[in-house]
């Protein structure tokens, strides 16, 4: 039952943040606030979640706002978006990638480059 309460709390707060966008905040600010909120809430329940980089996880899943907007406008094929790998995200990949314990240059020019995450 406690898990259901957590999910309800997250959904309600998310709806409140998103619904205030047109009235008081720009969409960018709402997005930033939402990511910060999710990081804080999930971090309360799971220490590992506090270190997650939600934006890049959404980009990897094709669920970030830019991809969704481009898809709805029919521009998805015309644009090519590569995720900007931030430090916390690189460390997540690094720790779970074979050979990831190597230096950062080896990681970026090896496994990640082969996956075409970066050019």
Image (spheres, rainbow, N blue to C red):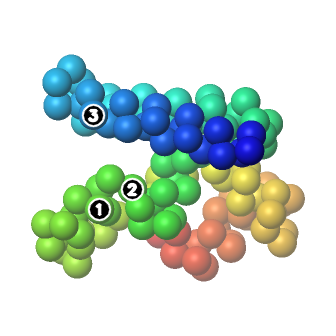
The residue positioned 63% from the left and 69% from the top of the image is: 112
**Which residue corresponds to mark 3?**
19
Q: Position of residue 9 (x, y in %)?
A: 56, 35
Judge whether 41 appears above or below 59 on screen. Answer: above
Q: Is residue 47 left or right of residue 84?
A: right
Q: Nearer the viewer, residue 99 or 103?
A: 99
Q: Nearer the viewer, residue 42 or 78?
A: 42
The residue positioned 78% from the left and 68% from the top of the image is: 97
Q: Which residue is outermost to the top?
A: 24
**Which residue corresponds to mark 1?**
68
The residue positioned 65% from the left and 39% from the top of the image is: 6
The residue positioned 63% from the left and 32% from the top of the image is: 41
**Which residue corresponds to mark 2?**
64
Dot 1, crowdedness within 10 Å: few (<14), some or many (≥20)? some
Of circles 1 and 3, the one toward us is 3
Q: Is residue 92 visible?
A: yes
Q: Quadrant location of residue 77?
A: bottom left
Whether label 1 touches label 2, CB < 8 Å: yes
Dot 3, crowdedness within 10 Å: few (<14), some or many (≥20)? few
């Amino acid at each position: 039952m406690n898990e259901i309460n957590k999910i309800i709390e997250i959904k309600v707060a998310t709806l409140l943040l998103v619904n205030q966008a047109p009235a008081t905040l720009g969409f960018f600010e709402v997005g930033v606030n939402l990511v910060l909120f999710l990081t804080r809430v999930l971090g309360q329940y799971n220490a590992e979640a506090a270190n997650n980089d939600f934006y890049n996880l959404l980009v990897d899943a094709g669920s970030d706002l830019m991809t969704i907007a481009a898809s709805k406008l029919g521009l998805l094929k015309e644009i090519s978006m590569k995720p900007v790998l931030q430090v916390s995200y690189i460390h997540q990949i690094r720790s779970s990638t074979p050979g990831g314990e190597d230096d950062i240059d080896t990681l970026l020019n090896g496994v990640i480059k082969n996956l075409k995450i970066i050019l």
